[in-house]
Amino acid sequence: MSKSPMITLNDVSKRFVGSVDDAVTNLSLTVDDGEIVTLVGPSGCGKTTTLRMINRLIEPSSGTITVAGSDVGTVPVHELRRTIGYVIQQVGLFPHRTVRQNIATVPSLLGWDTDHIGSRIDELVDLVAIDRSILGRYPLELSGGQRQRVGVARALAADPPVLLMDEPFGAVDPVVRGHLQGELLDLQSRLHKAIVFVTHDIDEAILVGDRIAILNTGGILEQFGTPGELLARPANQFVADFLGSDRAIKRLSLLPIDVSLLEPSLPGTAADQCMAAIDVGATLKEALDAIVSGNGRDVAVCAEDVCVGTVTIDMIHRRLTE
Amino acid sequence: MSLVAQTSNQPLIVWDWIGRNLTNIWDRTVEHIVLTVIAVGIGVLISAGLSLIALRWRRSYSPITWVAGLLYTIPSLALFTFFVPFTGLSVLTAEIGLVSYTLLILVRNMVTGIVEVPSEVLEAADAMGYSRRGRFLRIELPLALPVIITGIRLATVTIIGLVTITSLIGLGGLGYFINRGLQTFSSPIGTTQIFVGTVLSIALAVTADLSLVGVERILTPWRTRRIGR
Amino acid sequence: MSQFVGDVVAWFADPVNWTGSNGVPNRVWEHVQMSVLAMVIATAIAVPIAVYLAHRRMGETFVVGIVNLARAIPSFGVIAVALPITIRMGLGLGFWPTLLALLFLAIPPLFSNTHAGISGVDQATVEAAEGMGMTNRQVMTGVEIPLAMPIMLVGARVAAVQVVATATLGALVAWGGLGRYIIDGFATQDLVEVFAGGLLVAVLAVATELLFSLAERLVRRRYHSEQLTRSTV
């Protein structure tokens, strides 16, 4: 598939009026269809600025940005924004409009007829898992998690090919955040949007990102690659520090158990006969956890109540170094 | 002291007088309402214009509020006297003074209401492709409405009180009775008129205030409904 | 129009208007005296009660009620109603009904702003003061009142401007002050005198406003209190 990327940033820089330093420096990035790219870095690294340049809430000082093949600078700004979904941490739901009216915002701006909007809202309600009963409510009557889901539904309303998300789950509690992250990945597996996702949380960046762009102060791109690549081969000390001292553990959480590398166990042993067992779909991090919890003993791997092999520390180590 | 002896046995309120003057009282109440509505109406129009200027050119806000504040500080009676030599004892004189009084309250609330719309809401509106005008009319204005209506409430209640003073320049609405009463204060009819004018003016202010609260509730259901939950 | 302006200038230039009991100095002095007296008494009544109630976290609903009600009462009506009251009390015309009306108008803004100012003091600051062993009285005078001072002064400003304005109406109940020029001028159809009186009242009111604004600014700078809780008026 040699399709051109959905979003391309080509040598983009931004210097704000009155500032002597660049907020973003010669940044080049691509985001493909169906891909989530996370922008991560310390505060002041220009990740939000970068995001906001894509829908021209901020105009770049130099460089070009294309979305779906056309230079964003040449598209009338209101038309451009109606084709790009945008989700922010504070959500920014319109307090004076009901959930239904909030979701209908962009379709209304695009002049869809009432029936079309109605059927679209029906789809979105199912898609983002919000309760139909809240459609008539006002934002002040919603919980934090509900607001965030409505925000996502509103961003997706006109089925934009591109979705920009700025720390979308930063203001909700950790439990809800976990749910929302899972829902986003689930949603993406069905919708295949090109998503740019800004976060300051490296764990979130690793969890949701197909690729991660690590930015340094001044919007300098330190490394751009898949989570696995970054964790295995950080390009420099900054990236390594940012990924954290538990880099190896993080990597383990990305790697699935490779059945072909398991030590053989007695075939056909029932799972409940094993001392400790994990599911075949588990990650190596979970496997390691089971081994450590079991005082270092090997752990059986089971598929549907039947053991398929044994995972050992050696095997985990080999996977990390290969 | 003879005044005390003369008055202390008299009733404060002559209910008969009220019964005999119902038509007159009604006419003066209507006059009071008309003077108030004209003043607040014109005040809202002028303030809306001034607020748009202040929002468009932020630097103009402090000179505008400075002048409006000056007009607000000058006692209403003094303000009326400035125009009497030129516009006479007329409705125009009264309205110039009354309108001047509304400006500070209204401009301050209009500008504050718009400026205090949460930035994330504006960001979301921009990102969804609202034009500047569309954003102002559909997002900012409705969200500023509660603060704007609060300003209109304050202005209305204040003006209802001040209308009574226009009785000194020959108008007055219910203030007419207060003024007449003062001229015959030693008679029970005089005190009756004072009380009728004052009490009805208060009643009018309270009614107007509550009505505007009602209007606000109807226009801004998104704020009030959660209180019930 | 220029004729009229000339007449007003002439009025101010006329030595007759600067001497005697109806001269400008005396009328200004009367007006100022009455206003200061009303403010001092109103403060003595309103502030201690408001401080105490706010310190005890009491009277919130009362404050909201008093603010709304005070706004609905016409000052002209207040001074008119004061007249039959003082007459029946044997206090007569002039001074007493005017003072009574001014007190009635000055107390609500003083009370509500003092209450709001004290209530707005950060509870953590108060707890810290209590934690260090300050008595109730020390907390009030040493912590709460200084921190609430800018807002208390807003109340004083609103009250003072209102008092200066309404003292003008004292002329209607046979008191003196600057209102005499306006009321007497209307009575004798002397619009020049009316205008001159209006001008003097306006200047005095604006001067009062500026004086209190200045005091407010000085106090704010002194305590540079950032927590500018909103005034209620």
Image (tube, coloured by chain):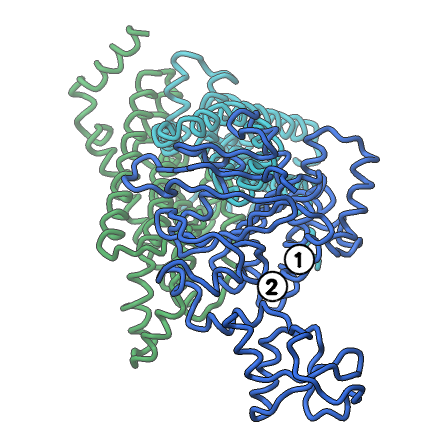
Chain colours: A blue, B cyan, C green
Q: Quadrant of residue C54?
A: bottom left
Task: Give me the chain letter of mark 2.
Answer: A
Q: Which badge, 2 or 1, comes first in the chain's sequence?
A: 2
Q: Position of residue B218 (x, y in %)?
A: 70, 41
Q: The disc numbered 1 marks a residue on which chain?
A: A
**Left or right: C47 in relation to B162:** left
How packed mark 2 is, by other alpha carbons closer than 10 Å (few <14, some 14-19, many 20 or more), is some
Q: Which residue is mark 1?
A: A185
- Residue B51 appears in the figure: yes
Left or right: residue A104 compared with residue A40: right
| Quadrant of the rendering where the N terminus of chain A is positioned | top right
Q: Position of residue C128 (x, y in %)?
A: 34, 75
Q: Indicate the position of residue A37 as horizontal and vertical percent values.
A: 55, 51
The answer as to whether the residues below labels 2 and 1 share one chain is: yes
Nearest the eye: B29 or C127: C127
Q: Secondary structure at mark 1?
A: helix
User: Quick one: label 1, few (<14), some, or many (20+) residues within 10 Å?
Assistant: some
Q: Tell which of A174 and C156 is nearer to you.
A: A174
Residue at the spot 53% in from the left edge and 29% down from the top edge: A71
Image-quadrant location for residue B148: top right
A166 and C159: which one is in front? Answer: A166
Task: Tell which of B82 and B52 is nearer to you.
Answer: B52
Q: Which residue is mark 2?
A: A177
Q: At numbered mark 2, what does the secondary structure look like: helix, strand or loop?
A: helix
Cα distance between the residues tagged 2 and 1: 12 Å
Q: Residue at x 75, y 89 (%)?
A: A266
Look at label 2 and name its amino acid.
Answer: Arg
Find out whether the residues at labels 2 and 1 contact each other: C-beta distance under 8 Å. no
Q: Residue at x 21, y 34 (%)?
A: C26
Looking at the image, residue A254 lies above or below residue C89: below
Q: Is residue A164 above or below residue A63?
A: below
The image position of residue C47, as x and y in percent, is 36, 60
